[in-house]
Image (cartoon, rainbow, N blue to C red):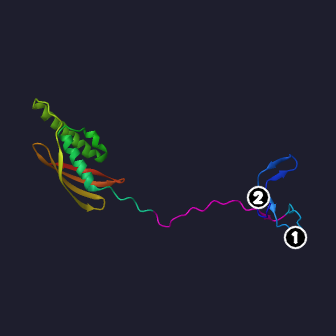
Amino acid sequence: MASGEARPIEDDEAGRERRGLLPVSDEGSDGAPPRRDAVALAPLPRRPARRVDATPPAPPAPPDATATARALGLCVVEVLTGGREVDSIARWVTEDVHRHLQQRAAVATRARSLGGRARARPRVQVGTVRTCPVADGVVEAAVVVHTRSHARAVALRLELRQGRWRATAVGVL
């Protein structure tokens, strides 16, 4: 065995093999085996060092506010026309907005029931979407949504919270 390599050590008393490092020294020129009281130890194998970048990764870019405004504007009109439950958009809106939409949806449902006829699910299409950043992490949006008989404007205030846009104010004209 070459100098500098780890070897098993035999336990003379128990007659069994122990694992560990044996002190080794360079063999002399006479070929004599190394002495047990040698000073050098065989090196332990090392794992490659992990590379650590000095610069932290850039935070992920926020989702597209225009796409969120488009989807949320459509959903709000679907809620008010009876085509969607308010709870389906709960993760996109604050509790105040959720409560406001529940009240508006209840009023709209009562108004539809007074008409006396069942209505099919409304066909809703999104028209123009405009967004305007007003502060860091805050966007105001206007979404035009078309139904068969009306065009409605949905005004939204979106705030970036925990990496996603949430509506903190919603108005429907």
For label 2, the SS is loop
Q: Is residue 78 left or right of residue 29?
A: left
Amino acid under disc 2? Ala
Q: Is residue 44 magenta?
A: yes
* 88, above or below 128, in the image: above
What residue is rendered at 26% in x and 50% in y? 167
Which quadrant of the figure has residue 66?
Answer: bottom left
Is the residue under label 1 in contact with that under label 2 (CB below 8 Å)? no
* Observer able to see residue 42: yes
Residues under labels 2 and 1: Cα distance?
Answer: 21 Å
Q: Position of residue 65 (x, y in %)?
A: 27, 56
Q: Is residue 89 left or right of residue 42?
A: left
Q: Nearer the viewer, residue 5 or 97?
A: 5
Query: In the current view of this chain or complex, which residue is farthest to the bottom?
Result: 29
Dot 2, how many residues are within 10 Å of its Cα: few (below 14), some (14-19), or many (20+)? some
Amino acid under disc 1? Ser
Stretch of the chain drawn in magenta: 38-56
